[in-house]
Image: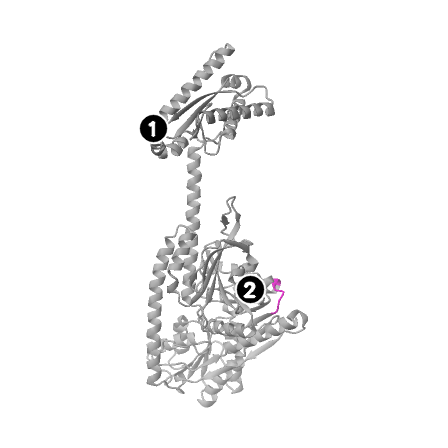
Amino acid sequence: MLSGRRKTIGAFLCKAYSLFDSAVYHALEKEAKRLDYNIIIFTTVGYFASQNYYDVQEKRMFSFAPIEELDGIIFAPDTYEIDGFKDELLDTVRERAHCPVVALRHVSQEFDCVHTDEKEAIAPLLRHLLDCHGLKKIRFLAGYEGHADSDSRLDAYRKAMAEHGLAVDEKKDIHHGNMWYTCGPEAYEAFFSDPDDRPEAVVCANDYMAAGLVRQLMNHGLRVPEDVIITGFDNVPNLNLEELKLTSVEQDFAGMVAAAMEELDRQIRSGDTRKQREHNIRIGVPGRLVLSESCGCGRRDSTYFAISNRENAHTIEQLNNREVGMTYLTIEMGGCDDLKQMHRVLISKKDDTPQLQDLYICLFENGRTADGEPVFSKEITDGVCLVHVMRDKEDCGMPMVSFQRSQLLPALAEREEPQVLYLMGLHQNEFAYGYAVYHYYPDCIPSAFFQHFNVVLSGALSNIHKRNEILTLYEERRLSSITDVMTRVLNRRGLEERLLQEWTSLCARRESMAFITFDMDHLKDINDTYGHQAGDYAIRSLAKAIRTATPKDGITVRMGGDEFLTVLPGAEKHAAQEFVRRFRKELEATNKRENRSFPVEASCGVYVTRLDETITLDQCMRMSDEAMYKVKEERHAARGENAEI
């Protein structure tokens, strides 16, 4: 894990913008300092109604996180609302965790847990309606079936009604919503469509559903609380209900985190774990009844609204500024061709994220090239490369440091004080590129803005990968177009691409240049006697001998058939002659090594000149050809053969 003297606790939470998450983040920061732990928050996105492909990919966090290396785990399974996420998280922790584990806001039969005592938390609200208001006709707007918190609150409703001798009609008095505003119309239809059978109060499993129902009641001319009382749960601040504030129950999320951290700390220090006990530890935290306008027991004065208006105006200004900043960030990041450009853009935009103190970007790595450059992957790998560092708002460059994924960050990220770091995956569609680690200034926490920021980062990395793939494909096609398939040396087009673009400059500098033309001897005899496969072998052997003898700055070309050309930029006559000797020696070694029925032989002609503005490439090649044909004629004449020209 993070290198250093501190132990590291991993926290698994979904979303970064709910009341619960915000309270948990603040509390974790406080408890990390108090108990001296580093905390890595593996945060993901996704909520019940989204069901998009990006959310599905967030599930990779469970397999990615180095759970075996953590010293302790806090996780909130009920924040994972997408189908299958919670079960996979539970399975992952169950199978891989070897450290103390405490579930947050989740009543568990197998894990130690800290939770709101839901039945006790909502009981004062129900007693307030039943005893203080004397109501009898109370209905319950529950969350979607299977939502653990909602089910507990529903059970408490049934119990309170039974204790007061009031029957509950499961079909008429209970309706299941979706824990969000959007269930308001259906809830109104379920509870208020019959004007002769309307409830005196509706208790909602959370404030969002209560707010959605209140809006529908207002649209239909019903008054709250005069015609019906509506209550919520969670006491979410700043819900837009015009001049109505909900009577609700406030959960002590900070108290839950403090209790969870205390229990983790106790287990880490003592070595006690759930596996060593017969029973798990359950710590229930009470809630607090907040009476307000939706039941008629509270009223906000003008001071409240003045403060709220100022806060709302400030929030709107911040959101507008962030929206503008995000727009420009998206445009500039979308134009990044490589990681260096991305790094420069992120540093140039650092003032647009005033809450962010440090930012580390780590990409999955598949080793290094021969030149020592990292090879980046589109899948989760054990190796990671740190490619971007902003620390204390300062540009700390692109370290390109490789390390093991189980560390999460290399040693350079360690600080003297405890850290709370937020880790988010960088991915798009089916590809995973790496992860970003965010460190905020004290009392600052992530918001939905930083989820958008992370998505933009992912998009930029996707574009860079696609661009590199296109460039690689283009280079492969280009090389294919300038390379001879049989011998893997350049073809005539390749020669022109290499030389013509700098020919004028070479001539202006009056560079010396050697041109050596090769032509195989007796190729027709080899083809006629041994077949064309043997002829192809002879051509490849000749090409290999030429290529082996050619220095690094030389250019070897198959001009066609059995004719080759080597160009030696900057070479004088003696260098050209030395090259020919190396070639002859290499060809002789090849013949001896292969020991075939026929030798591979070739004639070569050398033309060395000093370039000037009057000389063309074609002229040089023609002069080299003439020298080669002269040598070929002389060799054949010496043998008494007809020259093969």
Query: Quadrant of the image for the C terminus?
Result: top left
Label 2, residues with CA under 10 Å away: few <14, some 14-19, many ≥20: many
Point out the residue furthest to the left here.
614
Quick check: 610 above or below 268?
above
Q: Which mark is residue 438?
A: none
Q: Which residue is mark 2?
A: 89
Secondary structure mostly seen in the magenta stretch: loop
User: For the residue labelled by badge 2, is the local secondary structure a helix, a strand or a loop?
Assistant: helix
Between 605 and 342, the one lying in front of the other is: 605
* Left or right, residue 69 beside residue 241: right
- What whole-number distance in Å separates the C-alpha atoms at marks 2 and 1? 74 Å
Between 516 and 150, the one lying in front of the other is: 516
User: For the residue labelled by badge 1, is the local secondary structure a helix, a strand or a loop?
Assistant: loop
Label 1, residues with CA under 10 Å away: few <14, some 14-19, many ≥20: some
Residue 562 rendering spot, x and y as whole percentages? 47, 23
Image marks 2 and 1: residues in contact by CB distance under 8 Å: no
Query: Quadrant of the image for the N terminus?
Result: bottom right
Quick check: 588 above or below 400?
above
Tell me if residue 227 can be seen: yes
Q: Amino acid at mark 2?
A: Leu
Report the magenta residues as a range.
Answer: 95-100
Point out the residue furthest to the top here.
640
Q: Which residue is mark 1?
A: 612
* Left or right, residue 478 beside residue 599: left
Closer to viewer: mark 2 or mark 1: 1
Between 615 and 51, the one lying in front of the other is: 615
Residue 377 rendering spot, x and y as whole percentages? 50, 50
Residue 309 rendering spot, x and y as whole percentages? 33, 78
Q: Amino acid at mark 1?
A: Asp
